[in-house]
Image (spheres, coloured by chain):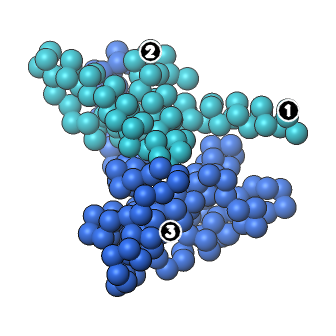
Chain colours: A cyan, B blue
Amino acid sequence: MARNPELEAILEARYDWEGAAPSQKAQLRDVYYKLLDQLLVRHARQGRKLARGDVIEAMGDEYKEFRRARDRRLAAKVRRLR
Amino acid sequence: MEPPRVFMSNSHEPRWDAISCFLAGEDRGEIAGDKEANALLLYAKSYLFFHKLALFRKGETARLYLNEPDESDFMFHRALLQRLIGDGSVLVKQVKRHGMARNAEGFSLADIEATVEELQQTERQWYGKITGRRRREILQDLFDGA
């Protein structure tokens, strides 16, 4: 599980986007990019510029870990309901 | 959007070969009807695209997240992912050119574009070229080593 609250919020937004209904895809993508861009803008103000794509790729393993935990929790819940 | 049960194995776990079968359907062809027919056809294609996406994500959850994936899982996953990105990109171009019928589901061109982006991010996440060292540097820099 991600330890940094800001990273956690970004991963959560990505998860929401991925799981969104078709009619909410664009809206939830924008929420995700807004969080990400806020972080990148703040970072750039400190003179350290990073490309959005590189950051997304760098967070890949964190996202996998996040989604694995969520999917496992959901699968356990479904099993209990059956 | 729940995928059709017919593509599930007896254990209700999606199988890559069955998912491939569903995703491989021809839907990139040129369209040449009248304006209204094109818009309706593109709505139907988009609906199917989102259905394929749901099925793909279900397979991904079962094989890559809830189990320990092997080489064959990655091979299927990558091929299907690229297929969906290709189909989605063609669909975006066609909808831009011909329009799409307004629909009860409420999705638009922007939603299809966002979905293609989502899939491209999934591709980078699993099959990107970033080195472990660069990855650590970026995360350290942004999140203090989170």
Question: Residue A14 shows which numbered tag?
Answer: none
Residue at image location 70% in from the left, 58% down from the top: B14
Query: Looking at the picture, how far across and down is residue A47, in whole percent?
Result: 11, 19
At mark 2, the secondary structure is helix
| Camera-nearest label, 1 or 3 | 3
Q: Which residue is mark 2?
A: A5
Q: Which residue is mark 1?
A: A80
Q: What crowding class fits label 3: few (fewer than 14 Cα within 10 Å), some (14-19), or many (20 or more)?
A: some
Residue at image location 28% in from the left, 22% down from the top: A39
In the figure, is residue B35 to the left or right of B3? left
User: Which of the chains bears the disc numbered 2?
Assistant: A
Would you place residue B50 above or below residue B22 in this image?
above
Q: How far apart, in angstroms, are the residues tagged by discs 2 and 3?
A: 41 Å
* Amino acid identity at mark 3: Ala
* Amino acid identity at mark 1: Arg
In the figure, is residue B63 to the left or right of B42? right
Q: Which residue is mark 3?
A: B44
Would you place residue B130 above or below residue A50 in this image?
below
Q: What crowding class fits label 1: few (fewer than 14 Cα within 10 Å), some (14-19), or many (20 or more)?
A: few
Tell me if label 1 and label 2 are in contact, CB under 8 Å. Answer: no
Q: How far apart, in angstroms, are the residues tagged by discs 1 and 2?
A: 30 Å
User: Is the residue at mark 1 from the same chain as the one at mark 3?
Assistant: no
Q: Is residue A27 visible?
A: yes
